Image (spheres, rainbow, N blue to C red):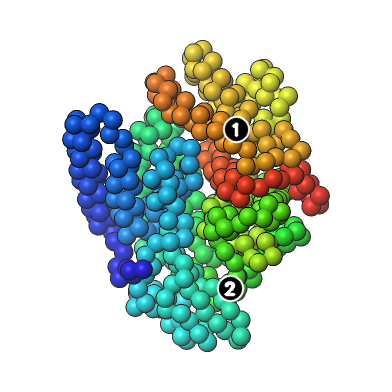
Amino acid sequence: MKTIDKIPTGKIGRTSKLMQTGVKLGGNYLKYYSKKAFNPDYTRDELDQSNADDIYDSLKSLKGSALKVAQMLSMEKSLLPNAYVEKFSLAQFSVPPLSAPLVRKTFKKYNGAYPEDLYDKFASESVNAASIGQVHKAEKDGKKLAVKIQYPGVADSISSDLAMVKPIATRMFNLQGKDSAKYFKEVEGKLLEETDYILEVKQSKEISEACAHIPNLKFPKYYEELSSERIITMDWMNGKHLSEFAKENTDQSKANKVGQALWDFYMYQMHGLKEVHADPHPGNFLIDKEANLIAIDFGCIKKVPEDFYVPYFELANKENINNPEFFNAKLFELEILREDDSEREIKYFSALFYEMLSLFTSPFHEENFDFADEIFWNSITTLSEKYSNDTELRKMNGNRGSKHFLYINRTFFGLYNLLHDLQAKIEVNKFRNYMS
């Protein structure tokens, strides 16, 4: 794979790159409408593919939060055309890495020494490049290590990157007024945390120690003396990325074993620790030869405050969802319904969230749940399409829900997608066996 010698870090350079992409997208639409004029049956597939290619090519050269957005969007399988999902999913663990000279320069800047001064062996070629950093193999004192190096300028460009994305997101999600600022602030705060590798090492150690007793779950050891604000050194863990395992696996018992470990890991964090690994994409998990789940990235951890946790999970109870008075009271607590809503808005959003929550919480209503169930997945797709095409929804204020929904919902959508990829059947309440 071609390497990168330089990343645009200034606001002007990054904005210019995105503007060039906008011109390309305009050209793609012109081609599409020209062909459509001569052939009314011509589909959007070629347009979607061209747009996905051009957007991804731009983002992968920018890296950082711009590419992180693509990574997050790749998990929205029910909302985006397949061309975007396929292309953006490359952001999870397969993007052009930094060149060897730039790696060396970056290492010296962040750790005060060159790699060869700190390790017995250090592979200058990256084995895994993602949105915020890339991973290299190393050895020291006979131990095989993984060294994650953050791309230059990532932390400094987050605010300006989000400022560029904000007008697009505001239109996409119909956000109105000053209230939308809380959502962007939440995203900015989490992205900034992800660039603080000292914090990541701390979080990694705390959660891996707290969850070490959960069966079929493994974590690397972290080495603080070989880590810094932009470098992390940990044990090298052998295994396949979860997506690769899911594509190749034909053993249902292994799928269930991995799926159960994943479910138990997330439920234990959510209900026991009240903080959760909020970046559940395939690039953050490996599967070893014994079908153990290995969690390797803890940059994005979402703390779940009690005043959000209680009403959120009260609405996972089927009886509560079906009690209109109780249900609406919780929607106000969760900031889904607002005091300044009209009667029409209250009626509309109550119905919308009743339909959504009844579907999305359905795994919690069973003792066992099969994430291969296509009826469940088709229902999610149908519901997404229904509301994405709803003209009534576009007329209403889209500022709905506590800021905590952003990462908690992302966590559950990501978890559900991973379990669906695995085609896993799980025991819903088994995690309670590991609660202290």
Name the N-terminal-most of marks 1 and 2. 2
Q: Is residue 112 visible?
A: no
Q: Position of residue 303 (x, y in %)?
A: 61, 48
Compared with 101, 98 (above or below) is above
Q: Quadrant of residue 174?
A: top left
Dot 1 alpha-carbon crowd within 10 angstroms: few under 14, some 14 to 19, many 20 or more: few
SS for dot 1: helix
Residue found 46% across the figure and 85% down from its top:
116
Q: Quadrant of residue 314?
A: top right
- Identified by mark 1, the residue type is Ile
Compared with 395, 5 (above or below) is below
Q: Which residue is mark 1?
A: 375
Disc 1 to disc 2, how far (Cα)? 40 Å
Residue found 79% across the figure and 52% down from its top:
434
SS for dot 2: loop
Placement of the N terminus among the 4 image quadrants: bottom left
Compared with 231, 326 (above or below) is above
Residue found 66% across the figure and 17% down from its top:
324
- Identified by mark 2, the residue type is Trp
